[in-house]
Image: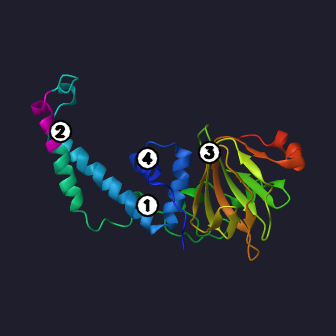
Amino acid sequence: MIRHHPDINLLLEYSAGSIDSAVALSVSAHLHYCESCSEQVNRFNQLGGILLEELEHSSYQPENVNLRATPSMLRPLDQLFDSVMARVDGIENPATVSEAQASEIPIAVASKIRRDLPANLAKLIVKPRFLKWRRVAPAMQIAHLKTGQNRCEVSLIKIGAGGRVLEHNHKGNEYTVVLRGAFSDQDGIYSAGDFLHRKPGDVHTPNATADADCLCLAVVDAPLKFTGLLGWLINPFVQLQPG
C-alpha cells in the first residue's frame, strides 16, 4: 500500500510541464505505481485542456485588463472562469491512465535490475551489467544514470537487506521513489511506490528492512552531508554528479 505521495502542487507542476526534467522523472516513476496520483494528474490535464479550449472561444483579451479596469471590463473573465468550473464539475470519472502514462506498464526483460521498472526509468538503463555501482557507505551503493540534463544528479541507490545508511543532512532537495523493497527512517516506513521529498536541512537515517535489499530512484540538486566522524571522512568524496 502506497502511503507517501508528491504534494498537490508538485503534481500540478508536473501536469503543466513546469518542473525540471529530472524531478519529472521521479514523479513519473511514482505514477507508475500510484493510481490515485495518476487520476489527479489526469484531472489536471483535462482542466488544462478545457481552459485552453475556453480561451480559444472567448472574446476576452488579457491586454484589455489594466489597473483601472472596471467591473464591466472584468466580467468576461468571470464568465470564462464559471464556464471552466462548470465543465470541470462534469468530469466524474477521469481516465486512470493518460497517453503519456500508457507506456509505463510493467516490462519483462532479461535483466533483474530493469524488470517491472517504470518504462521511462528503464530506458535509462540500457545495459544493466554496465552500471557502475559505487559503495559510498558500508550498506549503501549508488549508480549514476545519464539523463541529458545538468541540474540534478539522478541515481539508483541500493541498500542491503537490514542495512543502515549513515545519518546525513540534506543541503538541497532530494526526491526519492522506492522501486523495490522497503526502508524506514525517523518519520516512517517507505515501500514500493512511495515518494519522499527531503528538503534542505532535513536529517534522517534510512534503514532497509531485513527481508530484502531496497532499491530506490533518487534525484538530488545538492550533495548529501554525512554527520559524525565517519561522515567527516566521507564528505570530501561526495560530489554532485549531474548529467
The residue at which mark 2 appears reads as 77
Label 4, secondary structure: give it. Answer: helix
The CA span between labels 1 and 4 is 16 Å
**Amino acid type at image mark 1:** Gln
Q: Crowdedness of circle 1 by 10 Å Cα count: few (<14), some, many (20+)?
A: some
**Amino acid type at image mark 4:** Glu
The residue at which mark 1 appears reads as 101
The CA span between labels 2 and 4 is 23 Å
Q: Foreground mark, 1 or 2? A: 2
Q: Residue at x 21, y 30 (%)?
A: 62
Q: Which residues are magenta?
A: 70-79
Most frequent secondary structure within the magenta stretch = helix
The CA span between labels 2 and 3 is 37 Å
Residue 92 visible in the displayed image:
yes
Q: Residue furthest left?
A: 72
Residue 178 in the image: state x and y as whole percent: 62, 63
The N terminus sits in image quarter: bottom right
The C terminus sits in image quarter: top right
Q: Earlier in the sequence, mark 4 or mark 3?
A: 4
Label 1, secondary structure: give it. Answer: helix
The residue at which mark 4 appears reads as 13
The residue at which mark 3 appears reads as 173
Q: Crowdedness of circle 4 by 10 Å Cα count: few (<14), some, many (20+)?
A: some
From the viewer's perspective, tell me whether residue 71 is left or right of residue 195. left
Q: Earlier in the sequence, mark 2 or mark 4?
A: 4
Q: Residue at x 59, y 40 (%)?
A: 149
Q: Earlier in the sequence, mark 1 or mark 3?
A: 1
The CA span between labels 1 and 2 is 33 Å
Q: Foreground mark, 1 or 3? A: 3
Q: Earlier in the sequence, mark 1 or mark 2?
A: 2
Q: Foreground mark, 1 or 4? A: 4
Residue 87 in the image: state x and y as whole percent: 19, 56
